[in-house]
C-alpha cells in the first residue's frame, strides 16, 4: 500500500472512530436520562421503572459493543499510523 493509500485509510479510520465516539456519547446521554426517569417513576409507577431499567440494560449492551469496536478501530489506527510514519521516513530519507 502506498503512502497516499495509507493516508486515505487513516482518514477513513479517523472518521469511523469519531462516529463511534459520538454513538457512545449519545448512549451515555440516553442512559443518564433513563436513570433520572426511572428514579422519579420508581415510587408511583414501579412497572414503568422496571421497563426503564430494561431499556438501560439494552443500552449498556450497545455501549459495550461500541466500546469493543472502538478498541479494534484504535488498534487499526495505531497500526496504519505506524505504517505511514515508517513509509514517510523511508521515502523521504536523505542520504
Image (cartoon, rainbow, N blue to C red):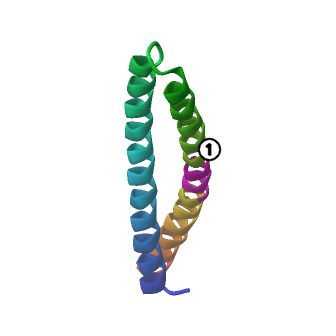
Majority secondary structure of the magenta segment? helix
Residue 50 horizontal/vertical position (percent)? 57, 28
**Viewer-closest of 80 and 25:** 25
Does 29 sit above or below residue 80? Answer: above
Residue 70 horizontal/vertical position (percent)? 54, 53
Q: Quadrant of the C terminus?
A: bottom left
Q: Quadrant of the N terminus?
A: bottom right
**Residue 67 located within the stretch drawn in magenta:** yes
Q: Residues within 10 Å of mark 1 (few under 14, many from 20)?
A: few
**Residue 88 located within the stretch drawn in magenta:** no
Q: Is residue 95 visible?
A: no
Q: Is residue 64 visible?
A: yes
Left or right: residue 45 compared with residue 67: left
The residue indicated by pointer 1 is 61
Left or right: residue 84 compared with residue 62: left
**Viewer-closest of 21 and 58:** 58
The magenta-colored residue range is: 64-72
Residue drawn at 45 percent across, 35 percent down: 31
Circle 1: element type: helix
Residue 68 horizontal/vertical position (percent)? 62, 50
Please tell me how many numbered marks the rendered image carries.
1
Q: Residue furthest top?
A: 43
Task: Quadrant for residue 36, please give it.
Answer: top left
Residue drawn at 50 percent across, 29 percent down: 48
Residue drawn at 53 percent across, 69 percent down: 80
Does 44 sit above or below residue 54? Answer: above
Residue 7 horizontal/vertical position (percent)? 42, 77
Residue drawn at 42 percent across, 21 percent down: 41
Amino acid at each position: 500500500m502506498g503512502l497516499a493509500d495509507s493516508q486515505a485509510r487513516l482518514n477513513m479510520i479517523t472518521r469511523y472512530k469519531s462516529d463511534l465516539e459520538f454513538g457512545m456519547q449519545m448512549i451515555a446521554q440516553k442512559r443518564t436520562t433513563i436513570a433520572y426517569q426511572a428514579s422519579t417513576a420508581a415510587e408511583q409507577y414501579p412497572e414503568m421503572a422496571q421497563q426503564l431499567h430494561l431499556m438501560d440494560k439494552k443500552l449498556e449492551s450497545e455501549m459495550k459493543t461500541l466500546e469493543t469496536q472502538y478498541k479494534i478501530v484504535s488498534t487499526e489506527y495505531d497500526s496504519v499510523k505506524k505504517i505511514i510514519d515508517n513509509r514517510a521516513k523511508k521515502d523521504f530519507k536523505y542520504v
